[in-house]
Image (cartoon, rainbow, N blue to C red):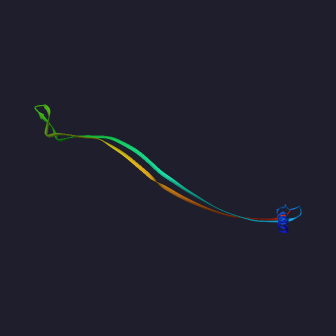
């Protein structure tokens, strides 16, 4: 019983607020630790389509040979020697189609550890 009364008196002294004019000292440490674990599952599917139509053409014409002017009894005429007309053309038409499917899947595991230590001290007179 004496021990209980003694502990009660000590607890009262430590728990009672300081009176005016008394000195006080505060010295407090705080240590915190936290851990966060995250497991994220991913399953993503992307589809893409592309269609391309194209067309191109070209034409070329050139003339080979010579043209000569002749005077025949007062009449002027033209004479063609080794005369050739060349004409060429080409055309290209087509289309392109592409379909793509991309899938990404898996798990991302994240662990975050956080440690915090703080200290507060003060002294004074109330």
Residue located farthest toward the left when viewing the structure as drawn: 73
The image position of residue 1, as x and y in percent, is 84, 67
Is 19 situated left or right of 97 in this image?
right
- Residue closest to the eye, 78 or 15: 15
At 15% from the left edge and 39% from the top edge, which residue is drawn? Answer: 83
- Residue closest to the eye, 74 or 106: 106
- The quarter of the displayed image where residue 26 is located: bottom right
The image position of residue 35, as x and y in percent, is 60, 60
The image position of residue 57, as x and y in percent, is 27, 40
Is 117 situated left or right of 123 in this image?
left
Residue located farthest toward the front when viewing the structure as drawn: 1
Is 28 situated left or right of 63 in this image?
right
At 43% from the left edge and 47% from the top edge, which residue is drawn? Answer: 45
Quadrant that contains the C terminus: bottom right
The image position of residue 5, as x and y in percent, is 85, 66
31 lies above or below 105: below
At 34% from the left edge and 42% from the top edge, which residue is drawn? Answer: 52
The number of callouts visible is 0
């Amino acid at each position: 019983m004496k021990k209980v009364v003694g502990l009660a008196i000590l607890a009262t002294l430590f728990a009672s607020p300081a009176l005016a004019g008394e000195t006080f000292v505060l010295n407090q440490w705080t240590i915190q630790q936290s851990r966060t674990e995250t497991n994220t599952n991913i399953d993503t599917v992307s589809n893409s389509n592309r269609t391309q139509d194209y067309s191109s053409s070209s034409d070329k014409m050139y003339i080979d040979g010579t043209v000569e002017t002749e005077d025949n009894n007062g009449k002027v005429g033209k004479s063609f020697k080794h005369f050739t007309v060349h004409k060429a053309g080409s055309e290209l038409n087509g289309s392109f189609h592409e379909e793509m499917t991309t899938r990404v899947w898996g798990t991302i595991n994240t662990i975050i550890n956080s440690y915090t230590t703080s200290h507060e001290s003060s002294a004074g007179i109330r």
